[in-house]
Image (cartoon, rainbow, N blue to C red):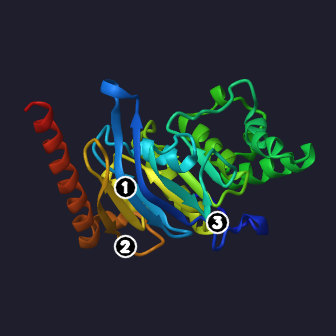
Amino acid sequence: MLDVLKFEDPKAASKGKGHISVNEVSITFGTGPDAHLAVETTSIEIKAGEFVCILGPSGCGKSTLLNAVAGYVKPTTGEVIVDGVMVEKPGPDRGMVFQQYSLLPWKTVYENVAFGPKMAGASRTSAGSTANTFLELVGLKKFGNRYPAELSGGMQQRVGIARALANYPSVLLMDEPFGALDAQTRLMMQESLLDIWKHFGTTVVFVTHDVDEAVFLADRVLIMSAAPGRIIEDVKIELPRPRTTDLAATSEYIKARQFCLDTIKAESRRAFEDQNA
């Protein structure tokens, strides 16, 4: 796990911020006979500071819904509101971490993390200080002069998390961020993410196709139907924190995991039958 207890910058606190309202959102790509309904009328309320995972069958619109919260995709109908402000475009209040590391390969690790604060108007000195702070947070300060290609996948994703946090967002959006990692690294990254989340209190919305990952991380798991996607289950995860991998053997974990698996399996079967009807 990462040692985040030494990080005491008061600006990192996001208490009371990060409330997300998705109100009757539908998202359609294309027009006419080529139109594709990706997300069907969906409403979600996510409290400030919650850790919510979005789970569902492949192609159900999980990432599309996340991109609407990020401001990369505009809803066809409905609205997304974060802290009382309608989302119309990406903003520094919403940090984004992708499955593909999306780092600038021609910039060093340090420069990648400092880039966001610089673009937000911070001085070179201030942006550099922020970069060093967050690289220390994720345990990579001594790698600041390296380039992304010189790092392992897990290390690159830690840089991605540091970069996303460097603007002190109230919401951290994560699109299958650990999907490309090996099993051991993935478990370590999950525990590290929970450490960071606990320290910051940032709202996290985490898209995954991995049921175990969702149950281990989340306060709530939102399960989407097969395409067109809509929320069909809102599962509260009644597991104590801090969480360790030992929880996987508890009856509470097994029950939540099985419910999620059964729900997704039923949706996947329905989608398969509809496609072959």
Circle 2 or circle 1, nearest the eye = 1
Label 2 neighbourhood size at 10 Å, few (<14), some (14-19), many (20+)?
some
Please state if 125 lies on the left or on the right of 190 as rendered: right
Reading the image, the residue beneath label 2 is 239
Q: Residue at x 66, y 30 (%)?
A: 148
Left or right of 118 on screen, residue 14:
left
Q: Amino acid at mark 2?
A: Leu
Q: CA distance from mark 2 to mark 3?
A: 20 Å
Q: Secondary structure at mark 1?
A: strand
Name the N-terminal-most of marks 2 and 1. 1
Q: Amino acid at mark 1?
A: Thr
Q: CA distance from mark 3 to mark 1?
A: 28 Å
| Residue 152 % position (x, y) | 57, 34
Residue that numbered label 1 is attached to: 42
Q: Is 154 located above or below residue 264 in the figure?
A: above
- Circle 3/circle 1 CB separation < 8 Å: no
